[in-house]
Image (spheres, helix red, strand yellow):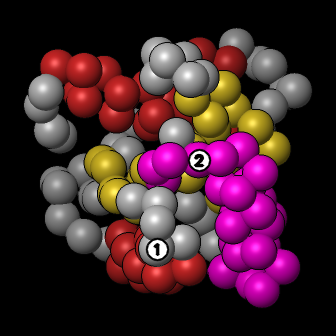
């Protein structure tokens, strides 16, 4: 599985292990809405044989949509159209960035965006294992 913490400047990325229990941050994709950036996202899906993509849904603290939510939904729809054999779903990402920042402890080796994608993916996998949805 691949998790994406979408942002127009940078898209954090994280991959799960084959068992679906670990999430590892990988290099973020810069400017994922550009032709080159979008191709890099598609390339990551193909290169790693990804079977599902989870895109972070950036809801406001109240649970309502924001301008960023609209952008992320459009990106996920575009991605789903580009990789029709790979399911693309959205998952609530509230607090993933702050959790990733706290967990990093100053680790500058991975981008905060990709660490947030790893937090998102771990949360998604936990909810799937419990049979619940957020």
- Residue with the mark numbered 1: 84
Question: In front: 98, or 34?
Answer: 34
How far, Cα to Cα, is label 1 from label 2?
Answer: 12 Å
- Residue with the mark numbered 2: 50
Look at 12% across and 31% down and name the residue there. Answer: 132
Callout 2: SS: loop
Q: Was residue 34 drawn as part of the magenta stretch in this picture?
A: yes
Residue 111 vs 17, above or below: the answer is below
Residue 111 location (% of width, % of height): 76, 39
Residue range corresponding to the magenta coloring? 28-53
How crowded pointer 2 is (Cα within 10 Å; few <14, some 14-19, many 20+) is rated as some
Look at 60% across and 64% down and name the residue there. Answer: 7
Look at 25% across and 70% down and name the residue there. Answer: 65
Task: Report the label total.
Answer: 2
Asked whether residue 113 appears in the rendered view, the answer is: no
Residue 133 location (% of width, % of height): 15, 38
Q: Was residue 38 drawn as part of the magenta stretch in this picture?
A: yes
């Amino acid at each position: 599985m691949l998790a994406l913490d979408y942002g127009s400047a940078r898209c954090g990325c994280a991959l799960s292990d084959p068992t679906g229990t670990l999430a590892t941050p990988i290099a973020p994709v810069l400017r994922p809405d550009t032709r080159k950036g979008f191709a890099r996202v598609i390339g990551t899906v193909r290169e790693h044989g990804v079977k599902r993509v989870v895109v972070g849904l950036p809801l406001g603290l109240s649970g309502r949509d924001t301008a960023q939510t609209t952008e992320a939904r459009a990106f996920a729809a575009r991605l789903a159209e580009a990789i029709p054999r790979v399911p693309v779903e959205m998952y609530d990402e509230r607090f993933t960035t702050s959790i990733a920042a706290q967990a990093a402890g100053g680790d500058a080796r991975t981008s905060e965006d990709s660490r947030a994608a790893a937090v998102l993916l771990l949360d998604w996998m936990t909810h799937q294992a419990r049979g619940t949805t957020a």
